[in-house]
Amino acid sequence: MEEKWKDITGWEGRYRVSDKGNVESYDSPGGHKGKRLTPHPNEKGYLMVHLYNKPMKKTAKVHRLVAEAFVPNPLNLPEVNHRDGNKRNNEASNLEWSTRQANVAHAMQNGLYEPAIKEHIGRIDKMKIPVIGTNVETNEEVEFESINEAARRCKTYGSHIVRCLNGERKSAGGYTWRKAVV
């Protein structure tokens, strides 16, 4: 099947995208020859391209450009999902519009969300650290089995206690905080 091309919305006459996931610039009035852009992966593995039209510049995800040009979105869904889970396969036939929840569920079902799961588990483990709170008014010390328990009982956020432990904050919930020696 022949590759189909459409102008990129907002960049008409400067750049176009194909249903196969390719992005090209047009010849410019200043004499620059049009060329195929080389996409580069971002930190999450999505292919990105740089679009320029002085003074404007934009870094765009290739899969989003393809979806906006070739994949109907009648429900106005916010995210683009790669059906096969391959972030480098940006063909229109491999893309679909999705909700955030459905996109994450798809990634988890296909084993593509592992780093985020590990990060989440790491945060949960961190919240299990035993801590000692020192009341800022009375200097009374109270020991808690976990940051979560301390946050609940002192009516504050666990993240605020963590920031105290990291030296980013002086107090939280009326207490200064340190790790308990186990």
Image: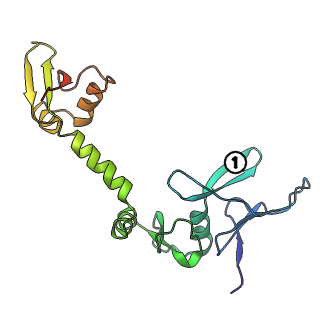
Placement of the N terminus among the 4 image quadrants: bottom right
Residue 109 versus residue 140 in the image, above or below: below
Residue at (56%, 75%) from the top-left corner? 71
Residues 169 and 7: in front is 169
Residue at (14%, 19%) from the top-left corner? 134
Q: In the rendering, at what x and y percent does residue 157 appear? A: 22, 35
Q: Which residue is farthest right?
A: 31
Q: Which residue is farthest bottom?
A: 1
| Count of numbered badges drawn on the protein | 1
Q: In the rendering, at what x and y percent does residue 58 appear? A: 66, 50
Placement of the C terminus among the 4 image quadrants: top left
Residue 84 versus residue 164 in the image, above or below: below
Query: Is 27 left or right of 94, judged from the image as shown?
Result: right
Residue at (64%, 70%) from the top-left corner? 21
Query: Is 80 left or right of 69, judged from the image as shown?
Result: left
Q: In the rendering, at what x and y percent does residue 53 appear? A: 76, 50
| Image colouring | rainbow
Residue at (73%, 60%) from the top-left corner? 37
Q: Amino acid at mark 1?
A: Lys
Residue position marked by numbered label 1 in the rendering: 57
- Binning the other alpha carbons within 10 Å of mark 1 as few (below 14), some (14 to 19) or many (20 upward) gives few
Q: In the rendering, at what x and y percent does residue 12 appear? A: 74, 63
Quadrant of the image occupied by residue 178: top left
